Image (tube, rainbow, N blue to C red):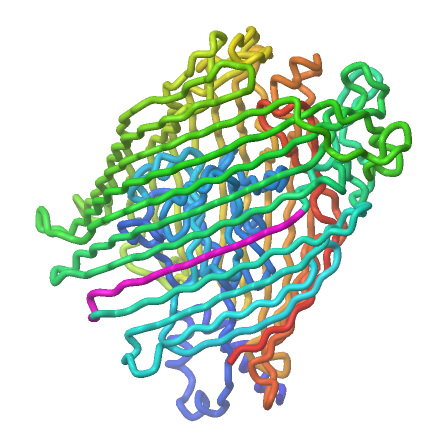
Amino acid sequence: MKPNRLVAAAVKAILAATPGIATVHAQQVPVAQQLEDVLVYGKAETYRPEDQTTATGLRMQLVDTPQSISVVSEDMLKIFNEQTAYNAVDLIPGASQGGQAFGLDRIYLRGQLLGDPRINGINTSSSAGTEYLDSYALERVEVVRGPATVLYGVTGAFGGEINQVLKRPQAAFHADVGFKDGDNGFGRRVEADVTGAVPGTDDRLKLRMVAAYTKYGDYQDTVVPLNNINSVYSGAATFDFTDKTSASVYLYKEERSFDPHDGCPLAQTASGTLYIPTAIQPENLYCNNPSDSHATFTQEVEQATLSHTFANDWNFLATATHTNTVRTSDYVFGFGPAGAYGLSPQDVYLYSYQDRYQQNGGTADVSLGGKFELLQRTQQFFVALEHQEQNQNRYNYGSTALGIMNMFTDGGKGILANGNPIPATPGPVYVGDKLGDTVATRASAQLLLNPIGRLNVLLGELVDHTNLSSENVRPGKATLGDAFTQTHALSRVGITYGLVAEKGPWLTDAKPYFNYSQGFLPNIGVFDALGEPLITPQREKSYELGLKTQWIDGHLDAYVAAYHSTDTNLPTTNYGQVGTSGGTFSSVLGGTNSYDGVEVELLGEILPGWNADLSYSHIKAEQDSLILNRKIAVANVPRDQVSLSTSYEFIVGPLKGLLVGGSVVSKNDVPLVGADTAIASGHYDPSNQVPWSGTRFDFVARYKDFAGFAKGLEISANVYNVFNSRSYFSPEGPGQPGFGNTDGPPRTVTVGVHYKF
């Protein structure tokens, strides 16, 4: 390309990002000069989703919603090779990873462990094991921070919601097949995605099929070869009866067979101070029994929807969803810390654990929403009714009589202190069973009112009626009943005000907002010192104040929010013999946890082809502890977390089609100890919650502008954790027998090739 054309390309790229200047430029330059060069631009992938509406009933724009909501687009999931929502949360302020131990994915939102994730806006209640859907089957991930209350129509969740939106069928034919290969446990993966309208149906019947198969290993140096497999199948069909009425069906099935390694216990000095055993290298951080540690996970989701738009543009939606989740775990992990319980400083007990959990659930949801005129202004409403039924079966076996292991011998790879291999798991000496049925009916109503000018007020009310019948059974012990029927009402108020009367060339929109919302969770499986169930529900109140802005003709979003939340009626451990269950601790509903924080997010296209996502969060998450007589920090929640992801895609010139980028995630002051019972029973210092800090760098490169027979080909390379930074998580929660920590993956290089046609 000639130099003058390179200059023209650069100038036009800048002008394209500033419409006002572009208009002045066009007025000053003669038409002949404007048409002198014809440049062909590619369509760059973007972080900011084109569809800025949420999956909530009111279908509000993100900038109009009086609550913090982040959306991870399909392009962003693909660019940074994020396999699930769990991998993507590091890009979101206020969200943090909590480890993948015990065969589960743990995500914290604003300091609180996330409950059941959503699929297409519907709560699937797959608490048999929190595993997030494969991102290749998703078109976006929505993260709502803070109690959503009535935002999704029917929910009372605490820390927030994660909504996984499955890929929808498209009328235009599209096919994508790919292959990826990587080291350090990534393995080999094949993918396929095909969509289009069925010929002869006038584009009324559209289909989509998505499949992925991964055979992967493990980054740890195990003594037994692993055969980890993950298979994903997803299908969708949409039929448009008319331009106002359509029906859709979604099917999703995922099967995993994997090793749920849970790492090693923490170690302690001679004086009893806890610390991270960094002397064990990441590939050897393996205190499990590699021959016994195994887990399987199966998740099936079937969903059908019917939507209709009335003549007055009111929207009706009916959805029926069925889920079946089965999780099994069979493994041995370290029971520590090293040197506790009278052992030598390097020794730990090994704890055998078997778990079987199955849950079936069905959810039916109907809603109606639309606009109406009141006080000579346009108002909006949304009402929803949901009925949900769940059945769950669970039993687990446990034994602490397996043996003693020197966690520093042979790097913690699984050798007993006497040098012998770890024996096979013995028969269980403890059994716990839980059977339960839950039936819940929820109704909600929302009003989005515009009383004056640019002021909008969101009012919502949710009524939840829950019936729970369950029993906890232990051999030789009395049956612990835990049944109740409860009805609760939750309220929500949100206020937004538009500061910008007309869009400018730089500032497009600016809206401060205030939000008050409530949440509640039933207390299940909580008993006092006499073995009586404690069923008063947990409640949360949350206050949030923020500012949402859009810049450069809506290409760039900038958000800031501050919040304060309190949870009450939390089960808090206290000393006292529990005669019916044989424990040494009992529970009271005297806990009050608090969560305070600030979040900042900057997301969008700064210049054509240049995308960036910058997020920062500061969280002070504290939990009550009666047995320690103080508040302690919540494990796995960083006090400060900052992430920056950016990429540049050449959309013109000789490098057109090349994308290069990277990301950095820095976490500071992440406590790894959060179980007050373990602190109290081991007489450890509660002020030493073993904090760690770390920074991870990633790199990405892609190229897709091939010509001729290779047109449609795309090659990619990703390097995760470029400088091999170590990261840690605590796999244990309240009630677990000791302190443990898992090590995040080391540097991983992945290459891939895709072909689109």
Would residue 267 appear left or right of 449 to someone viewing this image? right
At horizontal 47% and vertical 73% (from top left) the residue drawn is: 194
Q: Which residues make up the magenta segment?
A: 242-258
Would residue 106 appear left or right of 539 to someone viewing this image? right
Quarter location, residue 663: bottom right
Q: Provide residue 433's location: percent of width, then percent of height.
A: 52, 27
At horizontal 65% and vertical 33% (from top left) the residue drawn is: 730
At horizontal 41% and vertical 59% (from top left) the residue drawn is: 251
At horizontal 19% and vertical 49% (from top left) the residue drawn is: 380
Image: 141 above or below 244? above
Quarter location, residue 570: top left
Q: Provide residue 516's location: percent of width, then percent of height.
A: 33, 33
Would residue 499 appear left or right of 578 to someone viewing this image? left
Residue 556 visible, this angle = no
Please tell me whether the stretch drawn in magenta is mainly helix, strand or loop: strand
Decide whether residue 536 is among the magenta residues: no
Q: Provide residue 484's location: percent of width, then percent of height.
A: 33, 22
Residue 709 visible, this angle = yes
Residue 436 vs residue 668, the one in the foreground:
436
Decide whether residue 254 is among the magenta residues: yes
Image: 610 above or below 360? below
Q: Provide residue 420's location: percent of width, then percent of height.
A: 88, 33
Residue 450 vs residue 230, the one in the foreground:
230
